[in-house]
Amino acid sequence: MSSFTIRALTSETFDDFAGLVDRNKGMFASCWCTKFHPDCAEKGQSAEGNRALKQRLVAEGIAHAALVYDGDRAVAWAEYGSPEELPDIQHRKEYLATVERLPDYRVTCILVERAFRGQGLAAIALRGAVELIAQAGGGVVEGYPHDTSGVRKKNSSFLYNGTRTMYEREGFTYDRPKGLGNCVMVREVAPSTP
């Protein structure tokens, strides 16, 4: 089995990310993982507009992700950021009605290239995001996975943020339900020491 490595999404790794997105037909509905970013004129107009928006946000340092590499090819990713960077979460109205405190970071999207699914890369991507958050100073991290009651789905392509059981294995604890079939998972991440 290959040894996978983690790299942060930056201007230097954007082309690797773009290759992953292109091989997966623009991700979900050609969104280029811009869905959770604040609304703006570029967002949702076209696949090209979404790509340009993502590239601009990365260059400005307000779009973050952990890229999972197999050799020199990015094959999975986990998007994370502050609530200000990623305000447009699924079931937002219900979430805001039940939140006591916003997290420091949230993990909003995890994607594994089709040919690499079933090898635990979603968990590796999540772990990579947590490691990068620790390097940035840590804090309270939330994720919003699907709560499948431990049942593995045959078609995992709809699981845009993994499963509750995966988050539990990665040290997150269940906080509350969010929408139909999703939940809020929380983990306190300590800052990493250099």
Image (cartoon, helix red, strand yellow):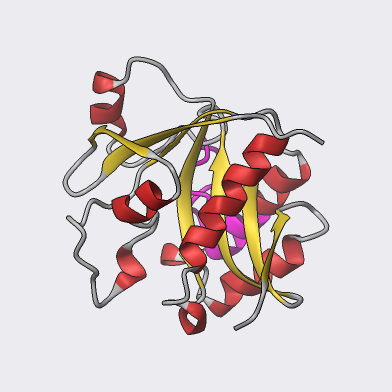
Closest to the observer, 152 or 43: 152
Please tell me which residue is depicted at 27% across the width and 41% down the height of the picture: 183
Whether residue 51 can be seen here: yes
Magenta-colored stretch includes residue 165? no
Residue 55 image point, x, y percent: 70, 53
Q: Quadrant of the N terminus?
A: bottom right
Res. 72 image quadrant: bottom right
Closest to the observer, 132 or 3: 3
Please tell me which residue is depicted at 80% across the width and 53% down the height of the picture: 11
Q: Is residue 152 left or right of residue 6?
A: left
Q: Is residue 64 above or below residue 148?
A: above
Q: Is residue 2 left or right of residue 36?
A: right
Q: Which residues are magenta?
A: 34-52
Q: Is residue 27 above or below residue 8?
A: below
Q: Quadrant of the C terminus?
A: top right
Magenta-colored stretch includes residue 51? yes
Residue 25 image point, x, y percent: 50, 75
Please tell me which residue is depicted at 72% across the width and 37% down the height of the picture: 135
Q: Is residue 41 left or right of residue 16?
A: left
Q: Is residue 36 left or right of residue 155?
A: right
Residue 151 image point, x, y percent: 19, 65
Whether residue 33 can be seen here: no
Judged by its main secondary structure, the magenta piece is loop
Closest to the observer, 171 or 121: 171
Q: Residue furthest top?
A: 100
Residue 50 image point, x, y percent: 57, 55
Please tell me which residue is depicted at 55% across the width and 58% down the height of the picture: 125
Q: How many marks?
A: 0
